[in-house]
Amino acid sequence: MQNRNKNAFTSASYNELVSRLCDSKLTTIGNYRLEKVIGEGSFGKVYLASHILTSSKVVLKSTSRKHAIPLAREIHHLRQLKHPNVTRLYEVVCTKDSIFLVLEYCPGGELYEWLYKETRFEEDVCCRILWQLCQGVRYIHNTGCVHRDLKLENVFLDKQYNVKIGDFGLSRESDCSRRTFMNTRCGTVAYTAPEIVLGQKYIGEFVDIWALGVIMYALLVGKLPFDEDDVNLTKSRIVHSTPVLPESLSAEAKDLILMLLQKNYQQRPSLDKILTHSFFTSRGYHVSDVTKARSTKKAEEKVRSRLALVGVDMEELDKSLSELRCDALYGWWFLLLERELRKETRKQRRGSTPHKTKDRSLKFFAVPSSPSVKEMTISATPMRADYKSYGKSSSLLTTFREWLFHPKYNPEKTPFNSDAGGDILCSSYSSGTVEGKQTSNTEVHSVSKNQCSPEFNRISLGKQQTSLYKQGSDADVSDNMNTYAAMLSTSSDSNHSHFSSSSLNFGRPPDDKDSNGRGVERSSSNASSFKSVGKKAWRSRSLSNVSSASSNSLISIVSSKPTPSAPAIAKSCSSIDPLQKLHLPRKDTTSLMRHNASAIRVLALPRRLSQSTYMKHINEPAFQEEEEEEAENNDG
Ligand SMILES: Nc1ncnc2c1ncn2[C@@H]1O[C@H](COP(=O)(O)OP(=O)(O)OP(=O)(O)O)[C@@H](O)[C@H]1O
């Protein structure tokens, strides 16, 4: 019997070896296990991968060896940069044909993607992004380097939506104290400074500052300041035109944009001056808060002793670190060190929290007190449903958005059929103007209390949508974020447990499926015009042709009454307690969902307030590193 087992084991392991050796698919590179392709760079694929020894997630950017020379410059600069707002380079792996840069993984994706989806940002949100961006750029300049290709596509966001400057392919050394003049024309036209357009010698630092102005304008206005279909016209605008600033921008925002976009580079402010501008100081950002290098001594000692324990040659390690070799040891060291630092942070945080809890949902509700909430009633009738698939993208925001527009309505996947805990139904309502047309949205969906997890910082929304009623455009999806922010705020005021056992039932319009049972494609002219531009085309043109006006986020809790008409909704909205606890039967919910829905009461938050609340929430550190905590527990 034992012999037979041994033979079976030997043959299985032999077969596995053969299939591994014969498999042409790339599964590992050095110490990294490739998980999936997440992007395509100019010179090769970009993979999400995990470090085999630490399980840390990283990005592997592949480049053909043919491009080794320009790549050397990128590696040379990047390996010197260690700052929280700059993507880290951990290792460089060379194979016969390719070179792989092992980089910090930024699950939040490109800032560009965010803006594409959000249309434009509130000033508070822009302020946070720009503050971090300026800190990163200041650090890069102080290290004796200029980026020269700052643009929305090269700014990434991490899990907590912190800014990470990436893509140093055009970077160059520069001595900011001696003002190095450069000749090489580089970068993307819409972000190019006038002195480069005019063919003059330029100073890299001021070119980066101009690009910061373009980014700031784009974040606040939703389009690039100088961007025409004709490249020459764009260039002419860059040199001669003053950017058009919407009236709605604050005086500080306008002032800073104009300072950054000074045609004469000598009149552009230094980064120190930018960081003390009232756009930042009026929102409580001060230079004294600029991230200081954190002491890593304790963590380093721990990592050293661990590596020594497993037989790593310490002399080799020191050489690798001091010579910035970016080899396997170097990568291992920094990934372990970062893990150790995060562990330290968690411990400190736990130490300073009087009531530590394992329950993430409690953390989720332990948010700052809510802004004042004002009541309003629904004024739009749910007309039709749109569903899009969710969860396919690596970007959190994309997942979030995909979830909201689930195309294949599948009752089997609703929380009602599962044994998940209580559910919270959220509804969001927004109104605005899209290409001159007045639109309004009413969206209804549910979130399980149990789904509060770090995935979305506060709430994991995946696979929890039950229905989405929509009328008008999808231009204001950001409002759904506001909904969650609003939900957080309200629930923090009262005890979160009032949601804990509530379940819900609501229906969907009978005509929202085609005969095959598929979700009906969205036909909103606004939505399609927004999409029809196409991402790439849109990328090179303006950031958006959609202008959204006022919008409000709402929360509703739903009863099991039949789907009412708009006036009925409005009536019921005004008569029932918004925070009513609902205990509805869970079984047979599929059929109930088809027929029963009614919003009880809706709470509205001014958009600006709720978006800034959201931004505050995403900075809460309580939602980090779930897997690491697990690993920590396993480590003992
Ligand atoms: N650190 C990262 N974290 C997460 N995703 C990343 C990271 N780096 C790159 N990506 C993804 O890979 C894609 C391509 O990467 P990147 O833009 O850096 O390549 P590139 O060669 O510089 O391309 P281009 O020069 O055309 O911008 C990005 O759009 C992004 O989706």
Image (cartoon, grey):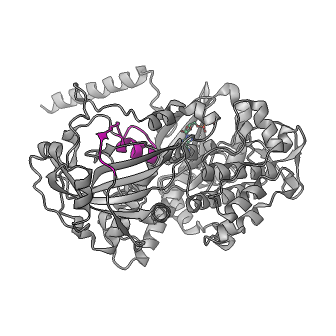
Residue 243 as seen in the image, left or right of residue 219: right
* Percent position of residue 603, x then y: 34, 64
Is 437 rendered above or below residue 25? Answer: below
Residue in view at x 17 percent, y 42 percent: 594
Residue 431 as seen in the image, left or right of residue 276: left
Residue in view at x 53 percent, y 30 percent: 534
Instruction: Identify which residue, 135 or 232, lies in the foreground.
Output: 232
The mark tally for this picture is: 0
Q: Which residues are magenta?
A: 380-405
Residue 71: which quarter of the image? top right
Instruction: Identify which residue, 424 or 436, lies in the foreground.
Output: 436
Q: Does residue 458 appear in this view?
A: no
Which quadrant is home to the C terminus?
bottom left
Magenta span includes 260: no
Magenta span includes 397: yes
- Residue at the far front in the pictured view: 567
Which quadrant is home to the N terminus?
top left
* Percent position of residue 585, x then y: 10, 55
Ligand 1 quadrant assignment: top right
Residue in view at x 69 percent, y 69 percent: 278
Residue 620 as seen in the image, left or right of residue 487: right
Residue 506 as seen in the image, left or right of residue 188: left
Instruction: Identify which residue, 299 or 514, lies in the foreground.
Output: 514
* Percent position of residue 218, x then y: 64, 48
* Percent position of residue 36, x then y: 44, 34
Q: Does residue 91 appear in this view?
A: yes
